[in-house]
Amino acid sequence: MTGTPILTAAQMREAEQAVFASGIPEYELMERAGVAAAEIIWRAGAKRDALVLCGPGNNGGDGFVIARQLRSRGVPVRVAALGESRTESARKARAAWNGPVEPFDQAGPATQIIDALFGTGLSRGLDAVVAERLCDLTGRAAFSYAVDLPSGVDTDSGALLSAVPDFGICIALGALKPAHVLHPAAGLYRRLVCADIGIATSDTIHHLSPPHLVRPLASDHKYSRGLVAVVGGEMAGAGRLAAHAAARSGAGMVRHLTSLDGAAALDAVITRQARGVDEVKAYLADRRLAAVVVGPGLGRGGDARDRLAAVLPCGHPLVLDADALTLLGGAGAEGIPHGSILTPHEGEFAALFGDLQGSKINRAVGAAQRVSAVVVLKGADSVIAAPDGRVAVATGASPWLSTAGTGDVLAGLAAGRLAVTGDPFRAACEAVWLHGEAARRAGAAFVAGDLIAQLPAAIGSRL
Ligand SMILES: NC(=O)C1=CN([C@@H]2O[C@H](COP(=O)(O)OP(=O)(O)OC[C@H]3O[C@@H](n4cnc5c(N)ncnc54)[C@H](OP(=O)(O)O)[C@@H]3O)[C@@H](O)[C@H]2O)[C@@H](O)CC1
Ligand SMILES: Nc1ncnc2c1ncn2[C@@H]1O[C@H](COP(=O)(O)OP(=O)(O)O)[C@@H](O)[C@H]1O
Ligand SMILES: [K+]
């Protein structure tokens, strides 16, 4: 994965130490951060009057540098500070600002508000009066900026530790942090900009980037492009959605095994009635199968359990979703073949891995390592984790995706990409990106089937 790196507060401090060890002083880094942030603010707000809110730590120090930079460009700037500056660099930045400093609790509104109260060093929620004033000033400003992070969010989990206002632009310094991509914090700004301040970042957590897909070759045929089986059950609709998504994923052929009568007449998806477990097993004996998805439309009764039990040892690469995850949760996540893709929403995840703690990223990584499989922990911020520690986080998903059946589409799509690539982490990343792109193209108030219709265009955009 090659998207923008995401660093926790501790990893950020390590990267910062490496810069200091190379001979660059701390204050130089603060100057770089302030200059880069001021440039972004200048481009957005030009000469509109600005109020910079400075906290006691280095985030506040960045604020003093920003104030000086903006003033040198002719912006009418005021600074309000929350007490004294407590770090050497912040004191230096404050001394270099030779304008007045207002007490935070007396600062009046401005057209532009720059929040440099707290960043990665926030250790607890803001005092209620401070948070309230920040919300009030930010709400009244026409332009608002959060320096590094909105003050009040927990860097590593994206949780809100106190009331936090909505910002226009969040200026991440040096690298993204988990709070920039995880909700609820990730929903607090309209635009996110990452300012390069010369910190080397080589970590394993990345923002999900658009995939590079390949066209079929002239020598390809339907089996070489990947044969997918969808093992459904009594709820044919969900299985059908997964099957049709797989059929528009780039895979060569899709078979949908249902326990119901009525194979579709004219359809690219081959629907087969496989009433008993032996019939399911017979279909799964096909060596040409490149991926099998089980869960959408499976059901949760005894028959569903038997079908799932037939799929788990089949030896083909698996995508486990929906009812399959719920059934596996009841069994303590036993029997999940290594290298599978699991696509739980939070409820299914809790049933499977309820004891895991920490941020959404930590929980997804813990789960992936526990079952040696790729875990896609879905939601407005979907986290894709591999057992080797690689993580991609998808942001900006359309909230219109919160409609029935879109998860079935994702499962089918993941199986299709798994059949094409043979690589579970890559397939999961491609599927989540294509799913999000299809939703963007589908616009508003779509249903799961509309999403499937957008998949060819989404794929076409990445060839
Ligand atoms: N990493 C990098 O590469 C670079 C980092 N840079 C910048 O540094 C920022 C991190 O700076 P930082 O570590 O000094 O922490 P910061 O967020 O300013 O706050 C810490 C202070 O606030 C205090 N405090 C905490 N919570 C509080 C509360 N609720 N209410 C009241 N007080 C509270 C806390 O006190 P304590 O918890 O010890 O009581 C401490 O005094 C980072 O976000 C970025 O902007 C750039 O300059 C250059 C490159
Ligand atoms: N509020 C939201 N914003 C963005 N994406 C969402 C939101 N809610 C759900 N999604 C996405 O929609 C899909 C829903 O999947 P799931 O909950 O399994 O639904 P279903 O079981 O009905 O198919 C997932 O891909 C999830 O990431
Ligand atoms: K801030």
Image (cartoon, helix red, strand yellow):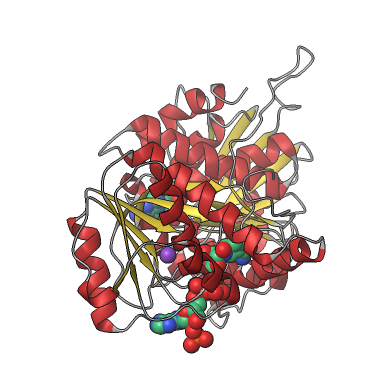
Q: Residue furthest top?
A: 218
Q: Nearer the viewer, residue 132 or 396?
A: 132
Q: Residue furthest right?
A: 22
Picture quarter containing residue 448? Answer: top left
Report whether residue 377 is seen.
yes
Quarter occupied by the C terminus: top right
Quarter occupied by the N terminus: top right
Numbered marks: total: 0
Q: Is residue 7 above or below residue 46?
A: below
Relative to 292, 286 lies left or right: right
Q: Is residue 36 above or below residue 108?
A: above
What residue sits 70% from the left and 73% below the top? Answer: 370
Picture quarter containing residue 393? Answer: bottom right
Report whether residue 240 is seen.
no
- The spot of residue 234 in percent (x, y) is 43, 53
Relative to 141, 245 lies left or right: right
Q: Is residue 358 above or below residue 434?
A: below
- The spot of residue 440 in percent (x, y) is 39, 35
Q: Nearer the viewer, residue 416 or 253?
A: 416
Q: Nearer the viewer, residue 35 or 391?
A: 35
Q: Residue furthest front?
A: 98
Relative to 63, 195 lies left or right: right
- The spot of residue 130 in percent (x, y) is 28, 78
- The spot of residue 332 in percent (x, y) is 61, 79
